[in-house]
Image (cartoon, rainbow, N blue to C red):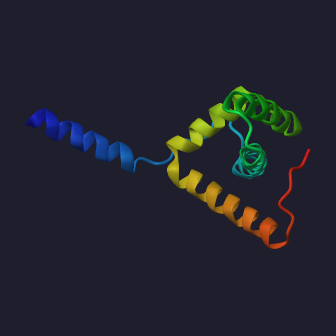
Amino acid sequence: MKKAFFILITALLAACASPEKPGENILTEDQMVDILLDIHTKEALVKTQNFPNDSAKAIYRRLEQDVFKKHDISRKQYEESYGFYLRNVKLLDGIYARLVDSLSLREGKGKVKVKD
């Protein structure tokens, strides 16, 4: 019983701890919004084409690499940054709120298109 109580208290304290500080290699929130906007747009493009599953994955990977190249980042940097924001949910919520706003603005202006 004491062990379960200790684990519960430790988990609660960890949940209340201040957010982790981003490392040197972590993309800023602004960068993540821009990158995720491009990534989700490319993903939607592939999904609407009804490619066979294997082809869709290959095409998406290529388009994703184009996004990384456009933003001058590596897959590793993107994955590390996304992992950081997953561990800091409040920050990730803010990023996705801005992302939804940006997509809504594009849609409202009829400018939802794939950028190169």
- Where on the picture, by quarter, is residue 54? top right
- Image-based side of 28 in relation to 85, left or right: right
Question: Is 51 situated left or right of 83 in this image?
Answer: right
Expressed as whole percent of the image width and height from the top left, the position of residue 13 reads: 32, 45
- Residue 24 appearing in the image: no
The residue under the point 85% across, 69% down is 110
x, y percent for residue 40: 72, 48
Which quadrant is the C terminus positioned in?
A: top right
Q: Between 37 and 72, which is closer to the camera in this rendering?
A: 37
Camera-side residue of 58 and 63? 58
Q: Residue at x 84, y 39 (%)?
A: 71
Tally the marks.
Answer: 0
| Residue found at the far right of this picture | 116
Residue 97 visible in the displayed image = yes
- Provide residue 86's location: percent of width, then percent of height: 54, 42
Measured along the vertical axis of the image, is residue 106 above or below residue 24? below
Indicate left or right for 81 with 111 as reference.
Answer: left
Q: In the image as oriented, which residue stretches furthest toward the left? A: 1
Q: Is residue 2 left or right of residue 89?
A: left
Q: In the rendered image, which quarter contains the N terminus?
A: top left
Question: x, y percentage for residue 77?
Answer: 71, 31
Relative vertical location of residue 106 with respect to residue 17 in this rendering, above or below: below
